[in-house]
Image (cartoon, helix red, strand yellow):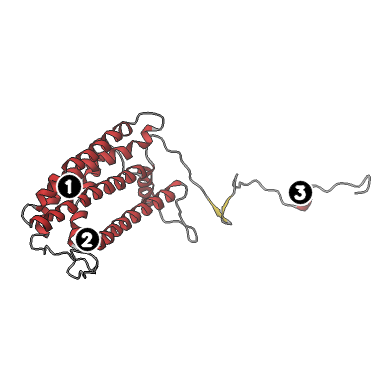
Amino acid sequence: MEAGQAQPQLDQVAKIEVGSMPELIERFSGQRVVSVTANLHDITLGDAQTHIQHALKNIPPPPKGSTVIVRGEVPALQETVSGLRVGLLLAIASIFLLLMANFQSVRLPLVVLSTIPGVLAGVVLMLLLTGTTLNIQSFMGAIMAVGISVANSILLVSFAEHARRTEGTGGAAQSGALGRLRAVLMTACAMIAGMIPMAIGFGEGGPEAAPLGRAVIGGLVFSTCTTLLILPAIYALLQKNASTNSSSLNPLDPESRYHVQA
């Protein structure tokens, strides 16, 4: 601009009006968004998710071309819980297939897995009694309790099956339960005693890990009773008319009907 030349004013090149505009424009993946955020206080993320879903159902539908999306930690929680559920189902299916291959039977794996409903009932009851929510920690505790219960059930069924083949069908379930009574009680008592401090919530970060200990304790208490009292009855019912001959197809197994002497 040359010296002495008049400078143009803004009203000479633009129209000035009083109006309003957003203080902040947010974008997510290139699209404009309006975020509604909040912090949690004295409420779990699962409870907050329930309140959010209830609030979204009661609001009017969004304008045409707009969508309502829940972001933040809620989608991550949903994905994690869904993955844990699928993992638990896959673990149960894998255990069933492995036991079916090991015992060469369909009924014996069903006997072993019959303790899982007792474990889940114990976990739910313990969470209700302690006022604990079903979260990631308690879900992991339920999976741990299921694993320990299945291990105890496998040993009991193995002992009962050995007694049935050597002594006959009568009393095989009772022999298996008595033979593994001490081992089952020692395993359950040791695990429960180890989980008591965690369930109470001692130490730094104790309240966050307490649901895991409570779930394990509840699941083990019920699974121990189920393994020692209910599982032998189910075994006796399903194996009452089973053959005492080995179902193995291995010709090198001396107990197999297809055994071939070298």
For marks 3 and 1, the one nearer the N-term is 3
In which image quadrant can residue 130 be found?
Answer: top left
Say which of 247 and 55 sits in front.
247
Q: Please, what is the three-letter code of the amino acid marked with disc 3?
A: Asp
Q: CA distance from mark 1 to mark 2?
A: 18 Å
Callout 1 crowding tier (Cα within 10 Å): few <14, some 14–19, many ≥20:
many
Report the Cα–Cα distance between label 3 and label 1: 88 Å
Of pointers 2 and 3, the one earlier in the residue sequence: 3
Q: Are marks 3 and 1 in contact (CB under 8 Å)?
A: no
**Mark 2: which amino acid?**
Phe
Q: Residue at x 30, y 56 (%)?
A: 89
Q: Which quadrant of the rendered structure holds the C terminus?
A: bottom left
Instruction: Please say whether residue 74 is visible from this viewpoint.
Output: yes
Residue under pointer 2 = 103
Residue 13 horizontal side relative to residue 214, left or right: right
Asked if residue 190 is positioned above or below residue 155 in the image, the reply reads above
Residue 59 in view of the camera: no
**Residue in the picture at 48% in, 61% down:** 64
What residue did someone put label 3 on?
A: 11
